[in-house]
Amino acid sequence: MINLSDVQAAAKRIDGRIRRTPTVAAGPDRWFKLEYLQHAGSFKTRGMFNQILAGNPSAAGIIAASGGNAGLAAAYAARELGIAAEVFVPVTAPAVKVAKLGKLGARVVRQGTEYAEAYAAAVVRGEETGALFCHAYDDAAMVAGNGTLVGELPDFDTILVAVGGGGLIAGVIAATNRSKRVVAVEPVTACALFAALEEGAPVDVPVSGVAADSLGARRIGDIAFEAAVAAKIESVLVTDAAIVEARRDLWDEHRIVVEHGTAAAQAALISGAYRPEPGERVVVLLCGANTNPVDLVV
């Protein structure tokens, strides 16, 4: 299982390659961790740098599958490290993310209608080329790198984390070393961790909704599931309507632009899916902003 020492080792490995993103006050006993300001627009750049550097890729470079953010992180890290990157995305991936992949120099391959299909094709391609396959979330080095953001936070009691495949929450669990409350937040329409906790093992779930491009993993990663069970993590569910409202609220009240998946964490507070105790110090982790903001300015 990934632990604090793994996160600390990752922090040393990626030092100087990632941004220390700010944490800002969002009201009494509330903070926003602005991880969407990370290079390539999401927390995944931390984990991807650590995964690539730990994996020591060959001349064939790296290959990844992603609905968007992990691919962007892979493309950015590869460019900075001077290696080739090939990214498989589902045909449903947002145009804004696909366009940015090209700008970062990655070769983009569209395959399937959801992440699972793009993933399967990428694995085959990696075996054919010898490129280092970089998992979007279920990889120990990826998880450890993601957890490095916790060391930049002020003292807190609870952190709300949007969950897709689980690479972020697993890193947060490892970094907090079970000393803080970590709350998973998932869309009702894409709740792989919630379902796994209910069933006692990772299971396939249907995926749809406004946040499916970033929280659309059909099955929670093994690393995240084991970490969540060991830490007795609570998972709360939010509706698409609550996510849309939270994303709009972040813009209207704070002038923060994030993607729908990221807004899920804030939706837990706005909708009442998570109700903090009086005086409970809560961090809302805003983890990604690779989105088209046009629908916010109306």
Image (cartoon, rainbow, N blue to C red):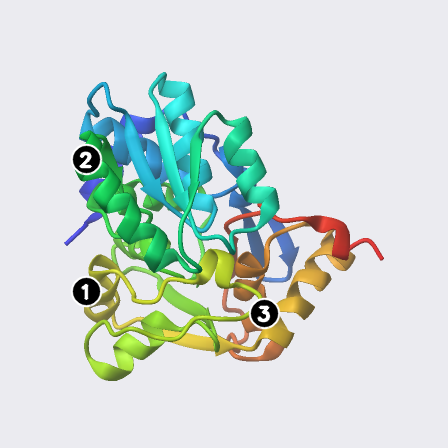
Disc 1 to disc 3, how far (Cα)? 26 Å
Give the residue type that dot 1 points to. Answer: Glu
Give x and y (percent) for residue 19. 48, 30
Give whichever of discs 1 and 2 has the lower sequence position: 2
- Is residue 208 among the parts visible in the rendering? yes
- Per the image, the residue denoted by label 3 is 267
- Per the image, the residue denoted by label 1 is 226
Few, some or many C-alpha atoms within 10 Å of disc 1 (few <14, some 14-19, many ≥20)?
A: some
Give x and y (percent) for residue 86. 36, 33
Give the residue type that dot 2 points to. Answer: Glu
Question: Which is nearer the eye, 36 or 212?
Answer: 212
Depicted 42 relative to depicted 166: above or below:
above
Give whichever of discs 2 and 3 has the lower sequence position: 2
User: Residue at left 23%, top 71%?
Assistant: 202
Which circle marks residue 215 in the picture? Answer: none
Give the residue type that dot 3 points to. Answer: Ala
Question: Which is nearer the eye, 215 or 59?
Answer: 59
Dot 3: element: helix
Residue closest to the far left: 1
